[in-house]
Amino acid sequence: MNPPPPPPPPPPSSSTVSAAVTPEEASAAALPAPTALQEIRGRKGLKGIVPLLGPAFVAAIAYVDPGNFATNIDGGASYGYTLLWVILGANLIGMLIQTLSAKLGLATGKNLPELCRERLPRRASFGLWIQAELIAMATDLAEFIGAAIALNLLFGVPLFISGLLTAVVAFGILALQSKGYRRFELAIGGMLAVILLGFLYDTLKVGPDASGVLSGFVPGFAGGDSVLLACGILGATVMPHVIYLHSALTQRRIAVENDEERHRLFKFQTVDVVIAMSIAGIVNMLMLVIAASLFFGADIPNVDTLEGAYHGFDVLIGGGAALAFALALLASGFASSSVGTYAGQVIMSGFINRTVPLALRRLVTMTPALIVLALGLDPSRALVISQVVLSFGIPFAVVPLIILTSDRDVMGTLVNRRSTTMIGWAISGAIILLNGFLLYQTFFG
């Protein structure tokens, strides 16, 4: 019996720059210490399951980030329940993709960017890194603007100052990793619970029309603008940066000794994904349902924006509902910004085998968001546009993921089934076609 691998060293200090690190060191910089599977063997019920849950809850917070708030509120206010089916489909797609990402890390002990660097031509890997960094900027745009709007609504803090405060909080949450991965996962899970409870409360206050909700699950659009918003919803739901991250969260989190244990652990990781992504899906659907029930056809200005939605809640169903919405938005912005920073380190260290200080990296990726806030541009519109940009980054993460998880030399006994691979390629094709249609509508429609 081979002994379990030693724990990776702690992440490098943010005051240092590593000019060249090994893939193992790069992984260690992004990973918590592993827990031996033997420690949880023999436990029954929740005691045996809970220690294995967590990575998918970190990933799921990206599926309910402020970009989701913007696109879902806009979708409900502008088109009623029409785009509810898009959220359901995007969430099911997200479940499959996050499961594949989690499986890749478990099977190989490496994350998706690392494997792309090892197995793709250097130019291809470098190109993927460049687009991933651009996607990271679009992600930060949504997260920082969302948290800034929440702080402004709750406490009257100017938007630019709120953006800077968000960066400080994000680093604080991320610092919990130094105390062990469970503290970080629990903090993110707690914020996910705040978001869920906030929208459950608002849903009970609204009392949506059941027949209208059911009609929203019938596929269809309401003109070219609704297609643009559908792309935004897809980009907000299936987040490229968290596809890269999930493989890093599982690559050495639990020590396994053989294929039997690896398959057993993968079953628990699948449960983790189903639970976490179901919660995220419910939250997203509640966002659109609430907006459709309250704002669609209502004679209230700007309810398709986050600020307008907040004031709409206050006017139509009371200050408590508005407070619940703002607190959920704040929790989303803080949690997703810390997860975005985590993902950024994984992306850089994996694709180009380099690391930079967290503070410097964060300064670069959050600059577009701070510019938007400083110039006083429409933050809600910027959020929606950022999600459309994210939708164009999805294939660049999904296609390599499908290729790698379909390769038996890479995955061993956890290689994809043929049906899984076919579904994955169909999803990739559908996303590419949807984005192509969006480009056609934008320039020639």
Image (cartoon, rainbow, N blue to C red):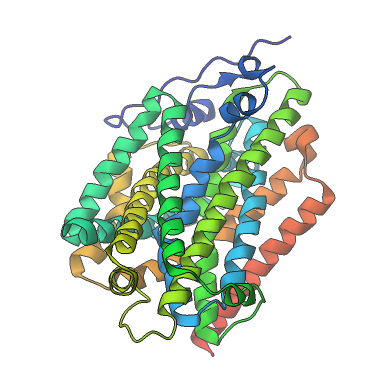
What x and y, as percent, mark residue 329? 35, 56
Residue at horizontal 19%, vertical 59%?
160
From what the image shows, is residue 423 above or below residue 211?
A: above
In the picture provided, is 36 more to the left or to the right than 170? right
User: Quadrant of residue 137 in the image?
Assistant: bottom left
Residue 269 versus residue 137: which sits nearer the camera?
A: 269
Farthest residue, direction right: 418
- The number of discs equals 0
Q: Residue at x 59, y 82 (%)?
A: 221
| Residue 211 spot, x, y in % from top left | 61, 76
Camera-side residue of 42 and 372: 42
- Residue at 24% across / 54% down in the picture? 163
Q: Quadrant of the N terminus?
A: top right
Q: Position of residue 395 (x, y in %)?
A: 60, 60
Residue shown at 43% from the left, 58% from the top: 199
Look at the image and tell me in which quarter the C terminus lies. Answer: bottom right
Q: Is residue 381 left or right of residue 427?
A: left
Instruction: State the image coordinates of residue 260 (x, y, percent, origin top left).
Output: 78, 24
